[in-house]
Amino acid sequence: MDWDVALSEWLKPFVDRLGHKKRRTMCPLYVSGLIGPGDRKSIEPMAARLAPDRYDRLHHFISSGVWDHQPLCDELARQADKLVGGAEAFLVVDDTSLPKKGTHSVGVAPQYASMLGKRANCQTLVSTTLAKDEVPVAVGLRLFLPEEWLNDANRLDKAEVPDIFRRLLTKPEIALEEIDRLLGLNVRFGVVLADAGYGLSAPFRQGLSARSLTWAVGIPKTQKVYPVGVAMIFPVAGRGRPRKNAIPDKLSIAAEDMLSEAEWQTVNWRRGTKGALTARFAVKRIRVADGPPQRILNKGQQHLPGEEAWLIGEWRSSGERKYYLSNLPEDTDIRTLAATVKARWVCEQAHQQMKEELGLDHFEGRSWHGLHRHALMTMIAYAFLQHQRLNQAQREKKSLERPTSTDPSSHPASGHQSAF
């Protein structure tokens, strides 16, 4: 099928939600510009390549037009669910940074930039990615607003930040709101994955459990945990009034200490392009120390035992050790646990491809609406490419499954002479 025809068919449910005739024209043009050749994927160079006489319209569509992009966000989630949704799918929560100079672009501030591994002047987008069989499809990119922005009404007004987003929210809180949006659209996935930037948040983990979701998240090595058999007791007071609240009969310890004497096993969790992917893993059932804080005599303050979970340790060939928590069932085997925590890498692949191939980080405007519309068009373009790749893989699979025998009786058209 012709590329332009395939893109037009893919975009039809999105275009139908735009309403206005000019917007229905500009959307395919913008997505074509993102997918097509060219080093810069900002509005001016894309217009110069595709439609020099339509720069003003293209700019108005992304940066100035008064239209709600949320219906297109919802349509993207539905299309992603058709592509890769299901019980075996993962929903990966992460964030990606867009380095920026100056101070006027919405949300830009000195903050940790994941792609640089250090603090830098950048914008940070909380991302949600639906993935199955190592095929990621981005379904959400939402800007995190630092406190310095939320305390400056003038900057918020100039960047046209909607009132509903002028709230102090942490990245884990934004992620939970995005998950609720996807759940409301009936997007299907089996496990939520996140790195330690989200996994260290007890409210985030508890929020996932409260939604009856299965999760596996990274944690810092210092995360406190209890042995799975910890019990709550009322110790007899030697003097004074008896205790009103029960305390754990064991103290919590750091995750790395809990696995210090564990048996580490070499696990092959999947095959990569260069062979089997392996590392050493150790797992143990524990109780997370994320319950209410309580002062324990002579021991200081401790968080009480919370949910029972898996503590997973990974010992990489470099010598680095990583730690994870998961509420996967108690009978889950170590290979499944390892494969689950390692499945998060696909979101990084999606971020990299959207930046390198589709210009996610090329937007030059300053407004909230402009940034989110550009990010949305980038995700739609990326979903189209994944749609094409999956179709190609399906065609190749069918080709391999066709009979190869030279015996005429093995072919469906054996009663007809070949045209070649």
Image (spheres, grey):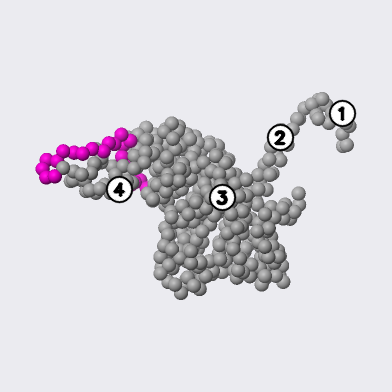
Residue 16 image offset from top left, x and y in percent: 68, 58
Residue 31: which quarter of the image? bottom right
Q: Secondary structure at mark 4?
A: loop
Q: Which quarter of the rendered picture does the C terminus lie within? A: top right
* Residue 233 visible at all: yes
Q: Which residue is mark 1?
A: 415
For marks 4 and 1, give the one nearer the viewer. 4
For marks 1 and 2, give the one nearer the viewer. 1
Relative to the observer, which residue lies in front, 129 or 85?
85
- Magenta residues: mostly which secondary structure? loop
Sequence-earlier tag: 1 or 2: 2
Per the model, the C-alpha gap separating discs 1 and 2 is 23 Å
Check the image and report above or below for 51 versus 3: below
For badge 1, the amino acid type reads Gly
Residue at figure coordinates x 57%, y 41% from the top left: 86
Sequence-earlier tag: 3 or 1: 3
Q: Which residue is mark 3?
A: 185
Per the model, the C-alpha gap separating discs 2 and 3 is 36 Å
Q: Secondary structure at mark 2?
A: helix
* Residue 196 visible at all: no
